[in-house]
């Protein structure tokens, strides 16, 4: 019986040993390996959270965040108490939700050594460095796609990006976000490390709402 119990525990022990370290509160600003750009698929978010300010604009992909990330899967958060940008409304073009902008700065921006205006300027640069495939700009009905098909569309739209630099996130077999790994210096696309990917065979893509 003891041998059997130990055998049953082994998979769990293996899982725990390889699990990402996770969030590291009060990390040291500037100490991380790369940036993770999270582009949230707003139509999916708004199909559930329709009262969010961002939903009124009916956007497609929006910046959920530009997150300091480490190669081992850990990431620093809430690194310092620093005031945010003086004019957060200047960033509503890429993140149309003021409360999310405030959260983004306090949780992630403070883990850089950048001033708030410089951090959000970096977010703009990262956002505009990614070309969104035509399909997502014109989608007017729900479609079913394999994750590899979506990633292939992004790869073709961004031919200079190396393999493994773009990941797909999903929830309940629905597209929730595209994530891009970017170098800490210069925002050059790099292969991702220490991150999970969507394991669904097929995902549903919610269409953009009619304006």
Image: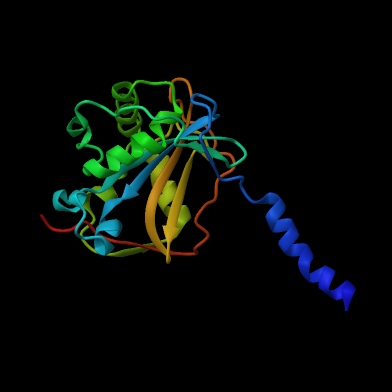
- Is residue 26 shown above or below 134? above
- Is residue 150 shown above or below 202? above
- Is residue 102 shown above or below 30? below
Residue 10 left/right relative to 204: right
Image quarter (top left, top right, bottom left or bottom right) of the N terminus: bottom right
Residue 59: x and y in percent read 21, 48
Residue 71: x and y in percent read 60, 36
Residue 63 left/right relative to 96: right
Count of marks placed on residues:
0
Q: Residue at 29% x, 43% y: name it.
A: 100
- Is residue 148 shown above or below 91? below
Residue lying farthest left? 211
> How is the rendered protein coloured?
rainbow
Q: Residue at 33% x, 41% y: name it.
A: 103
Q: Quadrant of residue 104?
A: top left
Image quarter (top left, top right, bottom left or bottom right) of the C terminus: bottom left
Q: Residue at 19% x, 28% y: name it.
A: 87
Viewer-side residue, 150 vs 105: 105
Viewer-side residue, 111 vs 71: 111
Q: Quadrant of residue 97?
A: top left
Residue 22: x and y in percent read 56, 45
Q: Quadrant of residue 187?
A: top left
Residue lying farthest bottom? 1
């Amino acid at each position: 019986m003891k041998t059997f119990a130990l055998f049953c525990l082994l998979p769990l022990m293996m899982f725990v040993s390889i699990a990402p370290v996770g969030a590291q509160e009060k990390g040291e600003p500037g100490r991380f390996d790369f940036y993770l750009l999270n582009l949230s698929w707003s139509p999916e978010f708004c199909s559930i959270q329709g009262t969010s300010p961002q939903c009124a604009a009916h956007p497609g992909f929006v910046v959920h965040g530009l997150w300091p990330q480490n190669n081992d899967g850990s990431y620093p958060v809430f690194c310092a108490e620093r005031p945010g940008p003086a004019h957060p409304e200047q960033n509503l073009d890429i993140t149309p939700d003021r409360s999310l902008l405030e959260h983004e700065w306090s949780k992630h921006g403070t883990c850089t050594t950048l001033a708030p205006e410089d951090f959000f300027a970096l977010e703009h640069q990262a956002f505009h460095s990614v070309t969104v495939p035509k399909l997502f700009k014109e989608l007017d009905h729900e479609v079913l796609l394999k994750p590899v098909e979506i990633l292939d569309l992004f790869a073709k739209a961004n031919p200079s990006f190396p393999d493994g630099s773009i990941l797909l996130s999903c929830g309940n077999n629905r597209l929730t976000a595209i994530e891009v790994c970017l170098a800490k210096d210069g925002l050059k696309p790099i292969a991702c490390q220490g991150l999970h990917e969507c394991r669904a065979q097929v995902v549903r893509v919610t269409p953009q709402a009619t304006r």
